Amino acid sequence: MPPLSLYIHTPWCVRKCPYCDFNSHERGELPEQAYLEALLLDLEKDLLITGERTVETIFIGGGTPSLMSADFYQQLFAGIRARLPLADKAEITLEANPGTTEAARFEGFRAAGINRLSIGVQSFNDGHLQALGRIHDAQAAITAANQARSAGFDNLNLDIMHALPAQTPEQAIADLEQAIALKPTHLSWYELTIEPNTVFYRSPPSQPDSDSMADTEQAGFALLNQAGFERYEISAFSQPGMACRHNMNYWQFGDYLGIGAGAHSKLSSHDTHGNLVITRYQKTRKPEDYLAAPAQARRNPQFIDGKDRLFEALLNGLRLVDGISLQTLKRTTGLNPAQWSPQLAPLQQQGLLTTNDERLRCTPNGLQHLNGVLETLAETL
Protein backbone atom coordinates (compact mmCIF):
# COMPACT_ATOMS: atom_id res chain seq x y z
CA MET A 1 0.00 0.00 0.00
CA PRO A 2 1.20 3.57 -0.65
CA PRO A 3 1.90 5.91 2.30
CA LEU A 4 -1.16 7.39 4.03
CA SER A 5 -1.59 11.07 4.88
CA LEU A 6 -4.37 12.88 6.72
CA TYR A 7 -5.79 16.22 5.58
CA ILE A 8 -7.93 18.28 7.98
CA HIS A 9 -9.98 21.17 6.59
CA THR A 10 -11.02 24.21 8.62
CA PRO A 11 -13.42 26.17 6.44
CA TRP A 12 -13.56 29.61 8.09
CA CYS A 13 -11.66 32.84 7.57
CA VAL A 14 -11.94 36.48 8.66
CA ARG A 15 -12.37 37.73 5.09
CA LYS A 16 -12.33 35.82 1.83
CA CYS A 17 -9.61 36.99 -0.53
CA PRO A 18 -10.65 37.92 -4.09
CA TYR A 19 -8.31 35.32 -5.65
CA CYS A 20 -9.36 32.42 -3.37
CA ASP A 21 -11.33 29.49 -4.82
CA PHE A 22 -10.96 27.21 -1.78
CA ASN A 23 -13.86 26.07 0.39
CA SER A 24 -13.62 29.01 2.81
CA HIS A 25 -16.36 31.04 4.45
CA GLU A 26 -16.33 34.30 6.39
CA ARG A 27 -17.40 33.94 10.02
CA GLY A 28 -16.92 35.76 13.30
CA GLU A 29 -17.36 33.47 16.30
CA LEU A 30 -16.22 29.93 15.51
CA PRO A 31 -18.09 26.80 16.64
CA GLU A 32 -14.88 25.17 17.90
CA GLN A 33 -16.37 22.51 20.16
CA ALA A 34 -19.00 21.47 17.64
CA TYR A 35 -16.42 21.27 14.84
CA LEU A 36 -14.01 19.30 17.03
CA GLU A 37 -16.68 16.71 17.75
CA ALA A 38 -17.68 16.60 14.07
CA LEU A 39 -14.10 16.00 12.92
CA LEU A 40 -13.56 13.13 15.32
CA LEU A 41 -16.86 11.50 14.39
CA ASP A 42 -16.01 11.94 10.71
CA LEU A 43 -12.64 10.28 11.35
CA GLU A 44 -14.21 7.36 13.21
CA LYS A 45 -16.46 6.61 10.24
CA ASP A 46 -13.48 6.65 7.86
CA LEU A 47 -11.51 4.21 10.02
CA LEU A 48 -13.88 1.55 8.67
CA ILE A 49 -12.11 2.12 5.34
CA THR A 50 -8.49 2.72 6.35
CA GLY A 51 -8.25 0.18 9.16
CA GLU A 52 -5.00 0.28 11.12
CA ARG A 53 -2.83 1.98 8.50
CA THR A 54 -0.25 4.36 9.99
CA VAL A 55 -0.52 8.05 9.11
CA GLU A 56 2.82 9.48 7.97
CA THR A 57 1.87 13.18 7.59
CA ILE A 58 -0.94 15.53 8.58
CA PHE A 59 -1.81 18.84 6.94
CA ILE A 60 -4.34 21.31 8.37
CA GLY A 61 -5.57 23.65 5.65
CA GLY A 62 -8.39 26.07 5.08
CA GLY A 63 -9.79 28.63 5.31
CA THR A 64 -7.58 29.93 8.06
CA PRO A 65 -6.66 27.12 10.48
CA SER A 66 -4.78 29.53 12.77
CA LEU A 67 -8.14 31.08 13.72
CA MET A 68 -8.80 28.01 15.86
CA SER A 69 -7.38 28.05 19.38
CA ALA A 70 -4.39 26.07 20.61
CA ASP A 71 -6.77 24.22 22.95
CA PHE A 72 -8.80 23.10 19.93
CA TYR A 73 -5.69 21.49 18.45
CA GLN A 74 -4.65 19.98 21.77
CA GLN A 75 -7.99 18.18 21.95
CA LEU A 76 -8.05 17.33 18.25
CA PHE A 77 -4.67 15.61 18.28
CA ALA A 78 -5.44 13.78 21.49
CA GLY A 79 -8.54 12.47 19.73
CA ILE A 80 -6.65 11.56 16.57
CA ARG A 81 -3.94 9.68 18.45
CA ALA A 82 -6.60 7.74 20.36
CA ARG A 83 -8.17 6.58 17.08
CA LEU A 84 -5.36 5.83 14.65
CA PRO A 85 -1.60 5.21 14.66
CA LEU A 86 0.70 8.13 13.81
CA ALA A 87 4.27 7.58 12.65
CA ASP A 88 6.87 8.42 15.30
CA LYS A 89 8.22 11.30 13.23
CA ALA A 90 5.00 12.33 11.51
CA GLU A 91 5.17 15.70 9.77
CA ILE A 92 2.25 17.82 11.06
CA THR A 93 1.68 21.11 9.20
CA LEU A 94 -0.63 23.99 10.08
CA GLU A 95 -1.45 26.83 7.69
CA ALA A 96 -1.40 30.24 9.40
CA ASN A 97 -2.14 33.78 8.33
CA PRO A 98 -0.16 36.67 9.86
CA GLY A 99 -3.32 38.60 10.70
CA THR A 100 -4.68 35.82 12.93
CA THR A 101 -1.72 34.89 15.10
CA GLU A 102 0.25 36.02 18.10
CA ALA A 103 3.24 34.59 19.94
CA ALA A 104 1.22 32.76 22.62
CA ARG A 105 -0.90 31.03 19.98
CA PHE A 106 2.18 29.81 18.10
CA GLU A 107 3.55 28.37 21.31
CA GLY A 108 0.25 26.59 21.92
CA PHE A 109 0.23 25.15 18.41
CA ARG A 110 3.74 23.80 18.94
CA ALA A 111 2.76 22.31 22.30
CA ALA A 112 -0.21 20.56 20.61
CA GLY A 113 2.25 18.59 18.46
CA ILE A 114 2.25 20.69 15.29
CA ASN A 115 5.85 20.69 14.02
CA ARG A 116 5.64 22.50 10.67
CA LEU A 117 4.12 25.91 10.02
CA SER A 118 3.12 27.37 6.66
CA ILE A 119 2.51 31.12 6.79
CA GLY A 120 0.50 32.75 4.01
CA VAL A 121 2.51 35.94 3.50
CA GLN A 122 1.91 36.46 -0.28
CA SER A 123 3.79 39.79 -0.35
CA PHE A 124 5.78 42.21 1.81
CA ASN A 125 4.40 45.21 -0.08
CA ASP A 126 1.47 46.86 1.72
CA GLY A 127 -0.10 48.08 -1.52
CA HIS A 128 -0.05 44.62 -3.05
CA LEU A 129 -1.40 43.06 0.13
CA GLN A 130 -4.35 45.45 -0.01
CA ALA A 131 -4.96 44.58 -3.66
CA LEU A 132 -5.02 40.89 -2.69
CA GLY A 133 -7.53 41.55 0.08
CA ARG A 134 -5.18 40.38 2.83
CA ILE A 135 -5.92 41.43 6.42
CA HIS A 136 -2.27 41.87 7.43
CA ASP A 137 0.49 44.29 6.49
CA ALA A 138 4.16 43.63 5.72
CA GLN A 139 5.35 44.17 9.30
CA ALA A 140 2.78 41.69 10.62
CA ALA A 141 4.16 39.06 8.23
CA ILE A 142 7.74 39.67 9.37
CA THR A 143 6.66 39.55 13.00
CA ALA A 144 4.73 36.31 12.48
CA ALA A 145 7.74 34.57 10.92
CA ASN A 146 10.00 35.67 13.79
CA GLN A 147 7.42 34.60 16.38
CA ALA A 148 7.12 31.19 14.74
CA ARG A 149 10.88 30.72 15.06
CA SER A 150 10.81 31.82 18.69
CA ALA A 151 8.01 29.34 19.40
CA GLY A 152 10.22 26.46 18.22
CA PHE A 153 9.12 26.00 14.62
CA ASP A 154 12.37 25.04 12.92
CA ASN A 155 10.42 23.74 9.91
CA LEU A 156 8.85 26.87 8.44
CA ASN A 157 7.32 27.58 5.05
CA LEU A 158 6.41 30.99 3.66
CA ASP A 159 3.93 31.39 0.79
CA ILE A 160 4.87 34.18 -1.64
CA MET A 161 3.07 35.19 -4.84
CA HIS A 162 4.31 37.00 -7.92
CA ALA A 163 2.56 38.38 -11.04
CA LEU A 164 0.46 40.52 -8.71
CA PRO A 165 -1.67 43.45 -9.96
CA ALA A 166 0.64 46.33 -10.99
CA GLN A 167 3.69 44.51 -9.58
CA THR A 168 7.04 45.26 -11.22
CA PRO A 169 9.73 42.57 -11.57
CA GLU A 170 11.86 44.49 -9.08
CA GLN A 171 9.04 44.39 -6.52
CA ALA A 172 8.53 40.67 -7.03
CA ILE A 173 12.22 39.97 -6.43
CA ALA A 174 12.22 42.29 -3.39
CA ASP A 175 9.43 40.15 -1.87
CA LEU A 176 11.52 37.05 -2.44
CA GLU A 177 14.63 38.67 -0.94
CA GLN A 178 12.69 39.62 2.20
CA ALA A 179 11.30 36.09 2.48
CA ILE A 180 14.78 34.57 2.21
CA ALA A 181 16.07 37.00 4.85
CA LEU A 182 13.60 35.50 7.35
CA LYS A 183 15.43 32.16 6.98
CA PRO A 184 12.55 29.76 6.31
CA THR A 185 13.36 26.13 5.50
CA HIS A 186 10.83 26.10 2.66
CA LEU A 187 9.37 28.64 0.24
CA SER A 188 6.30 28.28 -1.95
CA TRP A 189 6.73 30.86 -4.71
CA TYR A 190 4.03 30.87 -7.31
CA GLU A 191 2.25 32.99 -9.86
CA LEU A 192 -1.13 34.55 -9.08
CA THR A 193 -3.59 32.56 -11.16
CA ILE A 194 -7.11 33.82 -11.78
CA GLU A 195 -9.49 30.96 -10.92
CA PRO A 196 -13.21 30.61 -11.76
CA ASN A 197 -15.72 31.43 -9.03
CA THR A 198 -13.57 34.20 -7.55
CA VAL A 199 -13.94 37.96 -7.37
CA PHE A 200 -10.85 38.37 -9.56
CA TYR A 201 -12.40 36.09 -12.20
CA ARG A 202 -15.47 38.32 -12.40
CA SER A 203 -13.37 41.48 -12.36
CA PRO A 204 -9.84 40.56 -13.51
CA PRO A 205 -6.97 42.76 -12.28
CA SER A 206 -4.21 43.92 -14.58
CA GLN A 207 -1.19 41.59 -14.32
CA PRO A 208 2.32 41.74 -15.81
CA ASP A 209 2.59 40.41 -19.37
CA SER A 210 3.83 36.89 -20.03
CA ASP A 211 7.37 37.97 -21.01
CA SER A 212 7.74 39.95 -17.80
CA MET A 213 6.42 37.02 -15.77
CA ALA A 214 8.90 34.66 -17.41
CA ASP A 215 11.84 37.03 -16.76
CA THR A 216 10.77 37.44 -13.14
CA GLU A 217 10.50 33.70 -12.74
CA GLN A 218 14.00 33.05 -14.05
CA ALA A 219 15.48 35.77 -11.86
CA GLY A 220 13.66 34.30 -8.85
CA PHE A 221 14.92 30.80 -9.59
CA ALA A 222 18.49 32.09 -9.70
CA LEU A 223 18.07 33.99 -6.43
CA LEU A 224 16.57 30.97 -4.64
CA ASN A 225 19.31 28.69 -5.91
CA GLN A 226 21.97 31.14 -4.73
CA ALA A 227 20.32 31.14 -1.27
CA GLY A 228 20.53 27.33 -1.04
CA PHE A 229 16.93 26.51 -1.94
CA GLU A 230 16.39 23.50 -4.19
CA ARG A 231 13.47 23.60 -6.59
CA TYR A 232 11.82 20.21 -6.26
CA GLU A 233 8.35 20.98 -7.62
CA ILE A 234 6.84 23.56 -9.97
CA SER A 235 6.49 26.19 -7.24
CA ALA A 236 8.12 24.58 -4.17
CA PHE A 237 11.66 25.27 -2.97
CA SER A 238 13.35 23.89 0.12
CA GLN A 239 16.59 23.77 1.97
CA PRO A 240 18.21 20.30 1.55
CA GLY A 241 16.11 17.60 3.17
CA MET A 242 13.23 19.96 4.02
CA ALA A 243 10.76 19.25 1.20
CA CYS A 244 7.14 19.06 2.35
CA ARG A 245 6.56 15.36 2.93
CA HIS A 246 2.78 15.73 2.90
CA ASN A 247 2.70 17.36 -0.53
CA MET A 248 5.30 14.91 -1.82
CA ASN A 249 2.86 12.12 -0.97
CA TYR A 250 0.19 13.83 -3.09
CA TRP A 251 2.55 14.27 -6.03
CA GLN A 252 3.78 10.68 -5.83
CA PHE A 253 0.17 9.49 -5.96
CA GLY A 254 0.08 8.32 -2.36
CA ASP A 255 -3.11 7.88 -0.34
CA TYR A 256 -4.75 10.54 1.77
CA LEU A 257 -7.73 10.65 4.07
CA GLY A 258 -9.62 13.95 4.27
CA ILE A 259 -11.82 15.04 7.15
CA GLY A 260 -13.69 18.31 7.54
CA ALA A 261 -16.11 20.28 5.39
CA GLY A 262 -15.38 19.69 1.71
CA ALA A 263 -12.27 17.56 2.31
CA HIS A 264 -11.26 15.00 -0.33
CA SER A 265 -9.85 11.49 0.10
CA LYS A 266 -7.99 9.13 -2.23
CA LEU A 267 -7.59 5.59 -0.91
CA SER A 268 -6.16 2.37 -2.32
CA SER A 269 -7.34 -1.14 -1.57
CA HIS A 270 -7.45 -4.56 -3.21
CA ASP A 271 -10.45 -6.54 -4.36
CA THR A 272 -10.97 -10.26 -3.68
CA HIS A 273 -8.81 -11.11 -6.70
CA GLY A 274 -5.90 -8.97 -5.51
CA ASN A 275 -6.50 -6.20 -8.07
CA LEU A 276 -5.75 -2.62 -7.06
CA VAL A 277 -8.82 -0.46 -6.43
CA ILE A 278 -8.55 3.34 -6.07
CA THR A 279 -11.51 5.26 -4.67
CA ARG A 280 -12.07 8.97 -4.19
CA TYR A 281 -14.50 10.56 -1.75
CA GLN A 282 -15.58 14.09 -0.94
CA LYS A 283 -17.05 15.30 2.34
CA THR A 284 -20.11 17.53 2.64
CA ARG A 285 -18.96 20.96 1.48
CA LYS A 286 -21.08 23.53 3.36
CA PRO A 287 -19.88 23.89 6.97
CA GLU A 288 -23.41 24.11 8.37
CA ASP A 289 -24.45 20.91 6.56
CA TYR A 290 -21.27 19.15 7.67
CA LEU A 291 -21.85 20.13 11.30
CA ALA A 292 -25.46 18.95 11.11
CA ALA A 293 -24.54 15.40 10.05
CA PRO A 294 -20.80 14.63 10.25
CA ALA A 295 -21.42 10.87 10.43
CA GLN A 296 -22.98 11.06 6.95
CA ALA A 297 -20.42 13.46 5.51
CA ARG A 298 -18.75 11.02 3.10
CA ARG A 299 -20.30 11.14 -0.37
CA ASN A 300 -19.72 10.77 -4.10
CA PRO A 301 -17.46 7.68 -4.15
CA GLN A 302 -15.65 7.49 -7.48
CA PHE A 303 -13.63 4.50 -8.65
CA ILE A 304 -10.60 5.58 -10.67
CA ASP A 305 -9.73 2.98 -13.28
CA GLY A 306 -7.37 2.35 -16.19
CA LYS A 307 -6.11 5.34 -18.13
CA ASP A 308 -7.83 7.83 -15.81
CA ARG A 309 -5.75 6.44 -12.96
CA LEU A 310 -2.58 6.72 -15.02
CA PHE A 311 -3.33 10.28 -16.10
CA GLU A 312 -3.95 11.37 -12.50
CA ALA A 313 -0.66 9.81 -11.42
CA LEU A 314 1.19 11.66 -14.20
CA LEU A 315 -0.73 14.88 -13.51
CA ASN A 316 0.78 14.85 -10.03
CA GLY A 317 4.16 13.20 -10.60
CA LEU A 318 5.25 15.38 -13.50
CA ARG A 319 5.00 18.47 -11.26
CA LEU A 320 8.14 17.21 -9.54
CA VAL A 321 11.51 18.30 -10.92
CA ASP A 322 12.74 14.71 -10.52
CA GLY A 323 9.51 13.33 -11.96
CA ILE A 324 8.14 10.00 -10.84
CA SER A 325 9.62 6.50 -11.02
CA LEU A 326 8.15 3.97 -13.41
CA GLN A 327 8.09 1.50 -10.54
CA THR A 328 5.91 3.87 -8.49
CA LEU A 329 3.62 4.36 -11.47
CA LYS A 330 3.27 0.60 -11.87
CA ARG A 331 2.57 0.11 -8.16
CA THR A 332 0.10 2.96 -7.80
CA THR A 333 -1.81 2.43 -11.05
CA GLY A 334 -1.59 -1.33 -11.54
CA LEU A 335 -0.52 -0.74 -15.15
CA ASN A 336 2.74 -1.93 -16.68
CA PRO A 337 4.66 1.01 -18.24
CA ALA A 338 5.32 -1.14 -21.30
CA GLN A 339 1.60 -0.81 -22.08
CA TRP A 340 1.57 2.97 -22.29
CA SER A 341 5.11 4.41 -22.43
CA PRO A 342 5.39 4.14 -26.27
CA GLN A 343 2.63 6.78 -26.49
CA LEU A 344 5.01 9.30 -24.90
CA ALA A 345 7.35 9.26 -27.91
CA PRO A 346 6.05 12.51 -29.51
CA LEU A 347 6.58 14.46 -26.27
CA GLN A 348 10.05 12.97 -25.91
CA GLN A 349 10.92 13.89 -29.48
CA GLN A 350 9.83 17.47 -28.81
CA GLY A 351 12.21 17.64 -25.84
CA LEU A 352 9.42 17.95 -23.26
CA LEU A 353 9.69 14.56 -21.53
CA THR A 354 12.59 12.28 -20.77
CA THR A 355 13.04 8.83 -19.24
CA ASN A 356 16.26 8.30 -17.33
CA ASP A 357 17.23 5.84 -14.62
CA GLU A 358 13.75 4.36 -14.72
CA ARG A 359 12.16 7.74 -13.98
CA LEU A 360 9.81 9.77 -16.11
CA ARG A 361 10.26 13.52 -15.81
CA CYS A 362 9.70 16.76 -17.64
CA THR A 363 12.69 18.53 -19.12
CA PRO A 364 13.15 22.17 -18.02
CA ASN A 365 11.26 23.16 -21.16
CA GLY A 366 8.56 20.62 -20.31
CA LEU A 367 8.14 22.05 -16.81
CA GLN A 368 7.77 25.52 -18.30
CA HIS A 369 4.99 24.19 -20.56
CA LEU A 370 3.52 21.63 -18.18
CA ASN A 371 -0.10 22.48 -18.98
CA GLY A 372 0.50 21.74 -22.64
CA VAL A 373 2.25 18.47 -21.78
CA LEU A 374 -0.71 17.38 -19.65
CA GLU A 375 -3.21 18.38 -22.35
CA THR A 376 -1.34 16.18 -24.82
CA LEU A 377 -1.25 13.27 -22.37
CA ALA A 378 -4.99 13.61 -21.75
CA GLU A 379 -5.58 13.24 -25.49
CA THR A 380 -3.14 10.40 -26.18
CA LEU A 381 -3.21 8.06 -23.17
Image: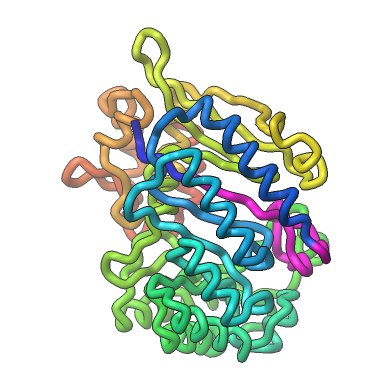
Q: Which residue is found at the position 49% from the left and 42% from the top? A: 82
Q: Quarter-wise, where is residue 335 in the image?
A: top left
Q: Residue 9 at x, y = what percent?
A: 63, 51
Residue 211 in view in this figure: no
Colour scheme in use: rainbow
Q: Quarter-wise, where is residue 236 in the image?
A: bottom left
Q: Which residue is found at the position 50% from the left and 50% from the top? A: 371
Residue 314 located left or right of residue 68: left
Residue 89 located left or right of residue 305: left
> Majority secondary structure of the magenta segment?
loop
How many numbered marks have been drawn onto this rendered protein structure?
Answer: 0
Q: Is residue 273 above or below residue 279?
A: above
Residue 19 in view in this figure: yes
Q: Is residue 52 above or below residue 348?
A: above
Residue 267 located left or right of residue 102: left
Is residue 13 inside the magenta stretch? yes
Quick one: 162 or 14, which is closer to the camera?
Answer: 14
Q: Is residue 41 above or below residue 204?
A: above
Q: Which residue is found at the position 56% from the left and 70% from the top? A: 210
| Span of residues in magenta | 6-29
Quick one: 109 or 133, which is closer to the camera?
Answer: 109
Q: Residue 349 at x, y = what percent?
A: 30, 44
Q: Residue 258 at x, y = what percent?
A: 57, 42
Quick one: 166 or 326, which is closer to the camera?
Answer: 326
Q: Residue 64 at x, y = what percent?
A: 66, 64
Q: Which residue is found at the position 38% from the left and 74% from the top? A: 154
Q: Is residue 44 above or below residue 102?
A: above
Question: Where does the N terminus fall, quadrant-wise?
Answer: top left
Quick one: 290 or 15, which is closer to the camera?
Answer: 290
Residue lying farthest to the left in this orientation = 357
Question: Where does the C terminus fall, quadrant-wise?
Answer: top left
